Amino acid sequence: MRPTASFDTRCYRAALYLYPPAFRREFSQEIIRVFNEAREETQAASPGPGVWAFRARMTADLASAIVLQWIRTGWPFIAVISILYPLVVTSAVSSLWRRTPFVLSRGTSDADVIVLALVAAVLLVVIAATIILTLWFTRPILYRRRR
Amino acid sequence: MAPLTPAVMHILLSLAGGERHGYAILKEVLQQTNNEVRLGPGTLYGTLQRLMESGWVEETDGPGSVPDERRRYYRLSRSGRAALKAEVERLEALVRGARARGIIPRTSRG
């Protein structure tokens, strides 16, 4: 019969899902094994405060390792660029919009339609730029994984 | 070459004594540092991954004729050993410099 995992192990195993998937697939079994061995040893050596110190140490280690692993994937950078780029483009367009006087000739009957078309065009450019940039920056990551 | 991080240095040093599995590396690091450096599993495997990518550490079947499938063993590669040697020489030169400036006594041991 398979022995029941301790509460600590179950919590730790659940937290491993915060790692990037590739790293988790590669090392999660080993990490859990090492965690269990270290926990058993700590519990045998100093059951009381030792276990709490162990939990604190493991939590700090897990948090820093997760952050580092995600940084290594490059995804946070892509996310920041994907958010920043449309924001910069829209703010640049809006500032230009304010500076350039938009004069409609007297013959124009429906100015609102023109404004709407311009807003739609800007939105399309922003969406297209986001998609293109995301694909462009993920290319090296995908290529590295395939190798 | 840039100076090695403490985690990399400790792991390479622990593997210099022969191939080891993850928990044995942690124990060896603890022993090397008089119980002062306790690497966590996340730091250990993150560092091992980087070391394997750079070719300094290799995965092996483990000691003995029958490989232990439950565990993964690691050993130092030739380039890893060269990197460790270069780092130890760098630290040695640093200690010599400190000794020459009287930071530590010339007769100091350890």
Image (spheres, coloured by chain):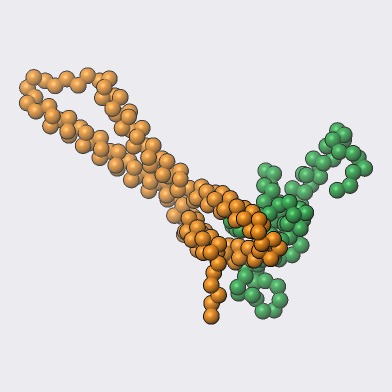
- The residue located at (25%, 40%) in the rendering is A124
Residue A39 in the image: state x and y as whole percent.
63, 63
From the rendered image, report the letter of the chain displayed in orange: A
| Rendering quarter of residue A81 | top left
Residue B27 in the image: state x and y as whole percent.
71, 61
- The residue located at (62%, 53%) in the rendering is A57
Relative to B30, say whether B91 is above or below. above
For this orientation, the residue located farthest to the front is A48
Q: Which of B103/B13 is in front?
A: B103
Report whether A137 appears left or right of A40.
Answer: left
Report whether A65 appears left or right of B65.
Answer: left
From the rendered image, report the letter of the chain displayed in green: B
- The residue located at (17%, 34%) in the rendering is A117
Relative to B32, say whether A105 is above or below. above
For this orientation, the residue located farthest to the right is B107
Q: Which of B44/A137 is in front?
A: B44
Q: Which of B4/B46 is in front?
A: B46
Is residue B75 among what the camera can see?
no
Report whether B89 appears left or right of A24.
Answer: right
Residue A44 in the image: state x and y as whole percent.
69, 66
Relative to B50, say whether B73 is above or below. below
Relative to A64, say whether A98 is above or below. above
Is residue A17 among what the camera can see?
yes
| Rendering quarter of residue A55 | bottom right
State how many labels appear.
Answer: 0
| Rendering quarter of residue B79 | bottom right
Report whether A113 appears left or right of B49.
Answer: left
Residue B66 in the image: state x and y as whole percent.
67, 79
- The residue located at (17%, 33%) in the rendering is A116
